[in-house]
Image (cartoon, grey):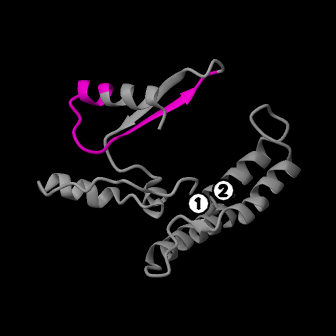
Amino acid sequence: MPEDLYDSSVRLATALGLEGLCEVEYRRDAQHRPLLMEINARLAGPIETALRSGVDFPLLVWQWATGAHVDRVEHYETGVRMRWLRGDMRWLRDNFRRAGRPDSVSRGKALWTFASEFLRTSRYDCLDRRDLGPVKAELSITAAAVRHRYRAPSPLPGT
């Protein structure tokens, strides 16, 4: 983690009186200066990436909260990529709707980006062979959203 982000994040969390785990998120401007986006005093969405990288944040938080010895994380895998397929499909759909606008890429580039990510990313958020419940729920939610989107509109009363 870049030192300028770590130090400022710790100072900010301390000034706010936060204890335990929190996510402090930044973007960098054109001059590469960090700009604070948000602070979340909770386990963040990308927690699955951290777990698969070798950092068990839920266990560390439990250790801290119960007064147990908190294990020091010495090693973890960097460069771990995960894919949230439903989110990626939403991005593709939204990009197609914005075709030609400055906040989109061409449809061909969007399709290439979406498809080529299958070659780069072998891990999927919520997919674990030992526990298929989360992936079943994700597929169910996605199917329900698709059914809702393409369902015929209800006729108006009296028509």
- The residue that appears at 44% across and 77% down in the rendered structure is 133
Q: Quadrant of residue 4?
A: top left
54 horizontally vs 82: left or right: left
How crowded pointer 2 is (Cα within 10 Å; few <14, some 14-19, many 20+) is rated as some
Q: Position of residue 89 (x, y in %)?
A: 68, 58
Looking at the image, residue 128 lies above or below residue 157: below
Q: Quadrant of residue 54?
A: bottom left
Which residues are drawn in magenta?
11-29
Residue 17 part of the magenta-drawn span: yes
Looking at the image, residue 130 lies above or below residue 55: below
Q: Position of residue 154 (x, y in %)?
A: 62, 63
Quickly name the residue at label 2: 88
- Between 112 and 158, the residue placed more toward the observer is 112
**Residue that sits furthest to the left in the current view:** 67
In the rendered structure, which amino acid carries the disc numbered 1? Trp
Q: Which label was assigned to residue 84? A: 1
In the rendered structure, which amino acid carries the disc numbered 2? Asp
SS at badge 2: helix
Q: Quadrant of residue 147?
A: bottom right
Q: Position of residue 66 (x, y in %)?
A: 13, 57
The residues bearing labels 2 and 1 have C-alpha atoms spaced at a distance of 6 Å
- The residue that appears at 53% across and 68% down in the rendered structure is 141
SS at badge 1: loop
Q: Position of residue 14 (x, y in %)?
A: 24, 28
48 horizontally vs 74: left or right: right
Residue 120 part of the magenta-drawn span: no
62 horizontally vs 140: left or right: left
How crowded pointer 1 is (Cα within 10 Å; few <14, some 14-19, many 20+) is rated as some
